[in-house]
Amino acid sequence: MENQYESNADGGTFGSKSNFLVVMVMILGVFAAILNETLLSVALSKIMGDLAISPGSAQWLTTGYLLVIGMLIPVTAFLIQRFTTRSLFLSAMCVFTAGTFVAAIAPGFALLFIGRVLQAAGTGVLFPLLTNVVFATVSIEKRGSAMGMIGIVITFAPAIGPTLSGIIVEHFSWRVLFYSVLPVALFVIVFAFLKLKNVTETSKPKIDAVSLLLSTVGFGGIVYGFSSAGEGHGGWSSNGVLIPIATGIVSLGLFIWRQLTVSEPLLDLRTFKYSIFRMSTLIMIIVMMAMFSAMLLLPIFLQNALAYSPLKAGLVMLPGGIVMGMMSPITGRLFDKFGAKWLAVIGLALIGHSLWQFAFITLSTSYSMIMVWNTLLMLGISMLMMPVMTNALNELPPPLYPHGTAIISTLQQVAGAIGTALLVTVMTKSSERFLERAAAAKEAAGLQIPAMMAGMKSAFLLAFGLVAIAWTISFFLKRAASPEGDTEGKRVSAH
């Protein structure tokens, strides 16, 4: 077995050439997968027209994608311990690639949705696997830099999704969005087959079928309930909304109880005994709700209210994506030197400022100002996400890395789905109330755009309120100490 901390120019932060190559191959695969989370945001209007579907149905191409990821990720702790890095990565990439192909050729909504589900099934495994590999191969003193390098593509991919989508949809069919990802995915599969080595040790844990069922029903019920309300199926008081949410809450309660009582839990909730992990996870949940809402709502507003083309709406996002990519390695190094607290405080302040400005956009707001506010939003997110996540996982002992990664990833994705559904609901209901008041005053004619602006204001103000809570919590963050027995990090296997 080669020394993990062998010093060489190519290995750098990752300790050895083989570790570096493993991470780079996996980063490229994760980039292609995560890009799909926001690739459809600008294209939804075109898809709705081509496939003759409602906005509520179109929302499921995004919400359903996040929901599947959220339901699958709890299993990743088991998968990472049960299967080798190589076999798990290749399997996930093959499922993702198959889904991309199905979505590209889909003649209608049903097959397009199936393709998105397959994409999500692959994506749900890839990021937790990559994070676990980094924590298994990089010493605690260098993890900020390592996660910063990963953050270049992990944060850059969703940030440039709307821009790429706008450029492609402006000139080509929305199907090109999927066809363009296929060559990258196929290259990653071939390269990984030839070069990818195993860097995590395997065991033979038993999967608890009851826990798996409870987590699936729990997360699925909650997100389905929120999404049904967003589609306008009777509002929040209808059985179609209340029953799934109530079922989800009860199932999650039973899931938590079971994880604390079985000998081999699907997700080891002892991670929440660590205070920094708890606070960091709560902050990331809130930020994910705010981030995905902005990425979904802003392009819709720019196209439908301000009449921007898909390309122009997408280009608003480009500077922010570039800033995220540039800042990730810098914030990684700053984290290694100073810790996560002040990065989180400043980052959340920038996010809050941008959301506040978005809430008060008018028809006279300039294109350049919207671009500046979005860039500040992305800057804040880049300062926050990777440092806070790294700090949370640094507090855990090595055996809990797969579980901590799975828990954070699960809650982030489900928070994104719930946040999207909740804020779309708030926007829709606020717009409806605006039109009802106008109708009562016999002034409803020509007020569709002001009604949308009123709805956007309510949604962004809610997101601002959530971020204000996270900002307050961030002042209590401390730097995670190296867990006992992990003073140097750990190379667990090389077979």
Image (cartoon, grey):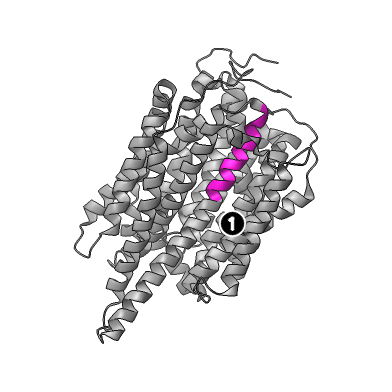
Stretch of the chain drawn in magenta = 399-413
Secondary structure at numbered mark 1: helix
Q: Nearer the viewer, residue 251 or 166?
A: 251
Please, is residue 421 above or below residue 384 in the view? Answer: below
Please, is residue 174 above or below residue 184 in the view? Answer: below
Residue 143 counted in the magenta span: no
Q: Quadrant of the C terminus?
A: top right
* Residue at the spot 44% in from the left edge and 36% down from the top edge: 152
* Residue at the spot 64% in from the left edge and 17% down from the top edge: 485
Residue 412 counted in the magenta span: yes
From where the camera sits, is residue 341 visible?
A: yes
* Residue at the spot 75% in from the left edge and 41% down from the top edge: 261
Q: Disc count in the image?
A: 1
* Residue at the spot 38% in from the left edge and 54% down from the top edge: 463
Give x and y (percent) for residue 154.
48, 40
Please, is residue 165 above or below residue 454 in the view? Answer: above
Residue type of the residue flagged with mark 1: Leu
From where the camera sits, is residue 108 visible?
A: no
Give x and y (percent) for residue 257.
70, 47
Q: Quadrant of the N terminus?
A: top right
- Residue identifier under label 1: 67
Q: Residues within 10 Å of mark 1 (few under 14, many from 20)?
A: many
Give x and y (percent) for residue 20.
56, 25
Which residue occupies the extreme bottom position in the image?
442
Give x and y (percent) for residue 53.
51, 74
